[in-house]
Amino acid sequence: MNIWYIHPYAGSPKHGMSFRPYYLAKHFNELGHNATVISSLYHHLCSIPAVKPGVGVVEGVNYFFQKAIPYEGNGVKRLLNMLSFGLGLFSRTFREFSKSQKPDVIIASTAHPFHLLAAKYYAKKYGAKLILEVRDIWPLSLQELVGISKRHPLSIIINWFQRFGYKHCDHCVSLLANAEEFFLKEGLEKHSFSYISNGIELTSEQIAEEIPEVLESNIKNAIQGFDTVIGYTGALGIPNNLMPLINAAEHLKKHNVGILLVGDGIQKRELEARVNELHLDNVVFFGRVPKSDVAHVIKYCDALFINAMPKKLYKFGISPNKIFDYMMHDKVVFNGIKSPGNPLEEANCEITFPANDSLALSQEILHFHNNKNAYEVSSSKFVKEHHTYKQLAKKYISLMEALVK
């Protein structure tokens, strides 16, 4: 099969996110198919050196880079970037590409939905099957996480594009396990839904045999003296809801339990100010480390942490990549996101707590601290069986083969 994977924010392992299109395309190719990732020439998650518009090869995978308006931040230019990407897929250059690489299947992934008209146009033109891939539910994510009104023009426009996708796709794949009922209400046909989760690429994300000496020394210095270390890796931002963990640390400082925060973000100063206000000496800000070194940091933690602001949105499912990094190390994860049937729950490796209840969180951590030997998990086996990109690609190919029959 000739497969187009349209994802406006696609990246690659060496050059930045998003990784899912790259890894799935790579494994589609290894399974005997021909996949091309179609992405924006410019976006904020990835920077590929010397990239040019049109066809290219990135780390062994075929790409088509569509011109789009550059931007910084979340202003008007970012919206123009999205719109120009979608419109650009009707350009002469892309039409010429489409003639030379006629698709059998088009996967249109909605990092934003403004390319769905083009995806449907080419699917109809070439008799291809259109798969709508949904990670974030637009515009619901904007409404709940950013606070944009349902009546805001941006909400209305995005909602129209997203509903167009539900109504006109041949099948909908979502990274959200519980989203089918919502999609059906938005216009998706019955029996047109599949859950294909996020995943992990074992060949590049496993722990290397040797940890860099400087990193090892810095980690050991950071956590020395703690009997139990609760770790967090990733963005220190408002959506990650880390303040309850800081507040919980106040209840844990007498018990030799340390909190290790690895990463950076817009809320870092506020979190540091709270640590100073509470005079906490058991919270360590480690700063950013390369993705290839995150696994080494996780290894030194006794358990990990994930959280979000409590929103109804999460009832549809969660798909952060970091949970698979955590699970690959057979670590208990303190999870404040209420999302039934999530991978942590399925692998029986989560300890849940109310998202904003720092006292309840501290009590759960203290119970873990006093009973660590009773918490043995084998989540890495679960990930290898169900959540590697190789396994996900096989699942995707089976779906595509059934559609094109």
Image (cartoon, rainbow, N blue to C red):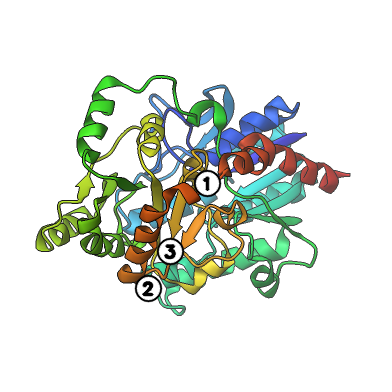
Q: Which mark is residue 268?
A: none
> Dot 1 lies on which element?
loop
Q: In the rendered image, which residue does mark 3 sit on?
A: 336
Where in the figure is residue 156, as x and y percent of width and height?
Answer: 50, 73
Left or right placement of residue 285 versus residue 169 in this view: left
Label 2 neighbourhood size at 10 Å, few (<14), some (14-19), many (20+)?
Answer: few
Left or right for 172, reference 333: right
Mark whose residue sits in front, 2 or 1: 1
- Mark 3 and mark 2 lie on one chain; the one further toward the N terminus is 2
- Residue 241: x and y in percent read 33, 62
Q: Position of residue 381 (x, y in %)?
A: 62, 39
Looking at marks 1 and 3 on the same chain, the residue that comes earlier in the sequence is marked by 3
Which residue is at a point 44% across and 39% down the rendered structure image? 17
Q: Amino acid at mark 1?
A: Glu
Residue 147 disc label: 2
Q: Residues within 10 Å of mark 1 (few under 14, many from 20)?
A: few
Position of residue 236 measured from the top left corner of the image (x, y, whole percent): 29, 52
| Residue 386 in sight | yes
Residue at the spot x=50%, y=56% of the render? 350
Name the residue tied to disc 1. 376
| Number of callouts | 3
Which amino acid type is marked by label 2? Answer: Gly
Secondary structure at badge 2 equals loop
Of the pair 38 and 85, the residue shown nearer to us: 38
Any part of residue 356 in sight: no
